[in-house]
Amino acid sequence: MAQPHHIARRNNTGFTLLELLVALALMGMLAAWGLPSFQALGERSAVASEVNRLQTALTLARNTAITQRSDVTVCPINKDRNDCLSDTDNWSGELVVFIGKPSESIPNQNIVRFFTATSGATSISRTNANVSYLYYTYLGKVGYGARTLDICPTNELTQTSGKSLVINPPGRARVDEDPISCGD
């Protein structure tokens, strides 16, 4: 009777170099394919964050004007935090809400709240009035009529569209449903 031959088996518990290179190539292709989507997600998040910051500031100003029965102003503020920036349409920096209208400087006791700047989005005011602030009357209405703030991502790598925040004369702020083109 013949004895069965024993075949020597090696324990192969690793990957070959070829298998490893193929796996790395596949992972690289998936990462390259998903990176633009990830960047667009970051830009959409930055735009949404800026819209929320502006809506919060405007709502606080309007509610304060109604409850305090006085004029309340929202404006971009200078670096010293004591006066509204003049001759600017850029609302991307730090904002202040205070009781009263802009004059020489803002008294500390009139300041309601500061809103720090967000990164990743810019806010530009489109309005007919030549003022860089917006104020609410004691009735909650906007002085100087309606205003629109366009919010666009600062990094326009992925052609992400922006949003428009429309403040109507009665003082309510709403986000326009139609996206705006930010590439221009």
Image: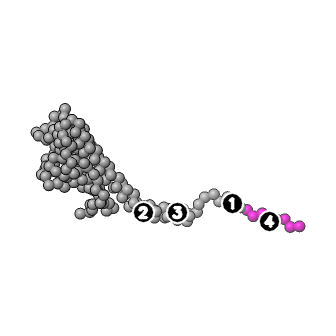
Residue 26 — which label?
Answer: none
Residue 5 — which label?
Answer: 4
Range covered by the magenta-colored residues:
1-8
- C-alpha span from label 2 to label 4: 52 Å
**Pointer 2 or 1: first along the chain:** 1
- C-alpha span from label 3 to label 4: 37 Å
* Residue at 45%, 64% in the rendered image: 29
Residue receiving disc 2: 32
- C-alpha span from label 2 to label 1: 38 Å
Q: For the C terminus, which image quadrant?
A: bottom left
Q: Is 145 positioned to the left or the right of 122 in the image? A: left
- C-alpha span from label 3 to label 1: 24 Å
Q: How many marks?
A: 4
Q: Quadrant of residue 138?
A: top left
**Identity, as a three-letter code, of the amino acid under mark 2:** Ala
* Residue at 13%, 38% in the rendered image: 105
Q: Position of residue 74 (x, y in %)?
A: 20, 43
Of tags 3 and 4, which is closer to the observer? Answer: 3
**Identity, as a three-letter code, of the amino acid under mark 1:** Arg
Residue receiving disc 1: 10
Residue 23 — which label?
Answer: 3
**Pointer 4 or 1: first along the chain:** 4
Q: Position of residue 68 (x, y in %)?
A: 21, 35
* Residue at 19%, 34% in the rendered image: 110
Q: Are dots 3 and 2 in contact, CB under 8 Å?
A: no
- C-alpha span from label 4 to label 1: 16 Å
